[in-house]
């Protein structure tokens, strides 16, 4: 239940041609407290309830618990979320032994594109595709819970 991931900005649309799958994701937050974030997600026709704990100091790892819920329940719970729903397309790109999840944001976060890769250990190495830019792992500004509060279009 410990998630280890690294997060990067994306420098081009080249990932779209390499993608083998994409999903539309709508998500909201019942709680954005960094110690216990509670997220509701509608991923195409699948609902999910996720609880995330406080990130490690370097932002590489944190507790994550996820449970599938019905589309109907997810839609109902999204109505109870705090203001700032996230709307994005997620592209999955296989690069050697890893899957990069590349999120292209819409609405108040339009223009932001972030890639994440999950790892087995914090020291694990991986191949970086050419469209991978600056690493933003641990920068809370890029957490979805923060983007729902302070969207990309409000940044200076």
Image (cartoon, rainbow, N blue to C red):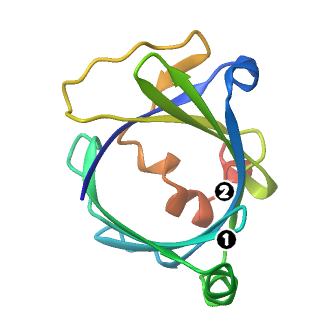
Residue at position x 76%, y 57% in the image? 108
Considering the numbered disc 1 on the image, is that residue within a helix, a strand or a loop? loop
Q: Are marks 1 and 2 in contact (CB under 8 Å)?
A: yes
Q: Residues within 10 Å of mark 1 (few under 14, many from 20)?
A: some
Above or below 80: residue 18: above
In the picture, the disc for residue 84 is 1
**Is 49 situated above or below 22?**
below
Name the quadrant containing residue 34: bottom left
Q: What's the residue at 60%, 82% (across, down)?
A: 82
Q: CA distance from mark 1 to mark 2?
A: 8 Å
Q: Taking 53 as reference, is 14 left or right?
A: right
Q: Is residue 141 left or right of residue 1?
A: right
Coordinates of residue 127 in the picture (x, y in percent)? 42, 12
Task: Tell me: 79 left or right of 129.
Answer: right
Q: Residue furthest top?
A: 130
Could you tell me which quadrant the C terminus lies in? top right
Percent across and percent down for residue 104 are 71, 41
The answer to which of 108 and 114 lies nearer the viewer is 114
Q: Position of residue 129 (x, y in %)?
A: 54, 13
| Picture residue at 55% right of the left edge, 19% below the top | 132
Q: Which residue is mark 2?
A: 151
Q: Nearer the viewer, residue 74 or 144?
A: 74
């Amino acid at each position: 239940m410990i998630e280890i991931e690294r997060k990067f900005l994306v420098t081009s649309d080249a990932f779209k041609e390499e993608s083998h799958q994409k999903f539309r994701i709508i998500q909201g937050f019942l709680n954005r407290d960094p110690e216990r974030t509670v997220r509701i997600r509608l991923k195409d026709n699948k609902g999910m309830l996720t609880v995330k704990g406080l990130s490690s100091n370097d932002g590489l790892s944190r507790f994550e618990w996820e449970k599938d819920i019905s589309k109907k329940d997810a839609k109902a719970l999204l109505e109870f979320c705090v203001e700032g729903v996230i709307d994005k397309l997620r592209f999955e790109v296989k690069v050697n032994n890893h899957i990069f999840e590349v999120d292209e944001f819409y609405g108040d976060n339009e223009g932001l594109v972030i890639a994440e890769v999950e790892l087995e250990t914090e020291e694990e190495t991986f191949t970086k595709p050419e469209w991978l830019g600056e690493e933003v792992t641990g920068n809370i500004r890029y957490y979805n819970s923060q983007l729902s509060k302070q969207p990309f279009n409000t940044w200076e």
